[in-house]
Image (tube, coloured by chain):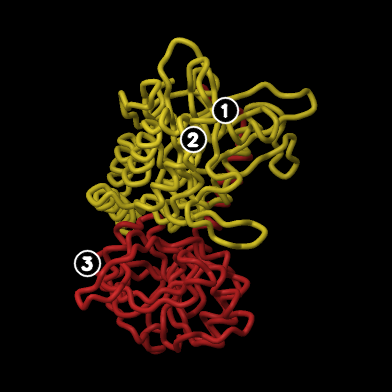
Amino acid sequence: MKAAAIELRHPFREADVRALPLGAAVSLSGAIYTGRDRLHRYLHDGGAAPIDLRDGAIFHCGPVVAPSSRADGGAGWRVVAAGPTTSSREDPYMPAIIARHGVRVILGKGGMGAATQAACREHGCVYVQVVGGAAAWLARRVRRVGRVWFLEEFGATEAMWEFEVAGLEGIVAIDARGESLFTAVRQDSERVLRRLLRGGPPERG
Amino acid sequence: MTEGSREDATGGWTATLVELIRRAATALPGDVIAALRGALQAEAHSCRAAGMLETIVANDVLAREDSTPLCQDTGTVTFFFRLPRASDHLALAASARAAIAEATRRGYLRRNTIDTLSGASRDDNVAPGAPVLHFEQRDGAPPEAWLLLKGGGCENMSAQYSLPDTRLQAGRDLEGARACVLDAAWRAQGMGCAPGILGVCIGGDRAEGYRAAKEQLLRPLTDTAAAPELAALERRLLAEANTLGIGPMGLGGATTLLGVKLTSLSRLPASYFVTVAYMCWACRRRGVVAAADGTPLRWLEWLET
């Protein structure tokens, strides 16, 4: 998936995002923002975004971060592990957040439901699947940790972290037409399951 | 946490369990790596599936090099102690808690424990229900401590069936159990971070079913169940599940599961449970054989049965 990755850099323009084909490998660079259940619920319920998320990317991720000292002597953060969390938990909140905040890219794992797919189509947003669990690999794509919000209130895992990433790769699993790779896999695998469950007595050996 | 002389007596255990956590959290067991490499070859024709498996294998190398968690969800921390008679369970429980607090300070574990009522995050991962501790006593062998780290994404995909199940047309026999396991693999799709490993218990009550199903995840991917009918069903289910086409992370492919591990427990006449513990590809397990004072004698990557 490395050879053909389409390069995308923050801010993510609507025209570029709408042009991404389903299943394309993409490589993201620039600022992205983490968010999990607490942040999504907060934004959904009308909470103010601490920065402008228009043309931005939200990464469904609760990273492991460690304090680190910066060259200028100030305190900073270092990402130790940063894989995606299951995105479907944010399905109740995501459509409203896409509509209200103009988010262009969602990074996560496992895909999202019909309402989020419709929001992707209506507002011009894509869902990018990154490899679940590959947290050490993904942490290496974070060049710098920027600001952090809601650290006290939500805790480090649920806080909103600003990551400066380079070459963060994934696959467009829901495109801006609202089409989902997961839907096809689910439907095809359901046909196989039906056949297996209808099958006669077990084969011997 | 310090408890005077008791802490002195178990300080060796605390250090050993910290090391056990480090090993489990930061490097996959050899059998899982071998299975992932095998899957990579099987998926050579599929750019997408192969690409994800390449990332998964590369991730293990990086985590190992740096002793950092290979997955950011360092999971429910579950210890299985296998101990001689007259072992001090209270002291070992204290050591396990101290080890987790220290492993969290060192960054082997994420702050991953939430107070369910208040929503507050615990700084040290020590709370009621965390860690999970199982003690078993036996004669004629030195103490062993086993550790399973199982993330929330895959735990959410675990499932328990009560047979008969009319939807699946599953009766109270091994054919019925087979239908449950295939259904669980299908329902999980890629959401449990496929390719997964299924630990399955047929029988038991609901609570023991989950415990025994999870314990199967300590077994190597290369072994087979002792009971011949379960061994045959393990092979069949693995082959059948891999025809589903769900593939790595649910984006399609020939590798939906890396292993199926079955066991059975007795049941009540009125009950027939099939319990499926879905483990992601990041199957983090380790064991250690230790002296009574906790001095490590041998580090293990899977449970020999």
> Residue sitting at 35 percent across and 67 percent down?
A170
- Name the mark on residue B258: none
Instruction: Describe the element under mark 2 as helix, strand or loop.
Output: strand
The chain letter under disc 3 is: A
Residues A106 and A35: in front is A35
The chain letter under disc 2 is: B
Q: Which chain is yellow?
A: B
Q: Label 2: how many residues lie within 10 Å, few (<14), some (14-19) or many (20+)?
A: many
Q: Mark 1 points at which residue?
A: A202
> Residue sitting at 65 percent across and 62 percent down?
B118
- Residue B97 vertical position relative to residue B138 in the rendered view, above or below: below
Answer with mark 1 or mark 3, whichever residue precedes in sequence: 3
Residue B147 place in picture, x, y as percent: 44, 36
- Residue B295 vertical position relative to residue A111 in the rendered view, above or below: above
- Distance from disc 3 to disc 2, alpha carbons, whole Å, reads 43 Å
Residues B133 and A99: in front is B133
- Distance from disc 1 to disc 2, alpha carbons, whole Å, reads 37 Å
Q: As shown in the figure, which amino acid type bears the numbered disc 1?
A: Pro
- Residue A159 vertical position relative to residue B70 in the rendered view, above or below: below
Look at the image and tell me whether residue B260 can be seen.
no
Residue A96 place in picture, x, y as percent: 59, 82
Look at the image and tell me whether residue A203 can be seen.
yes
Residues A139 and A79: in front is A79
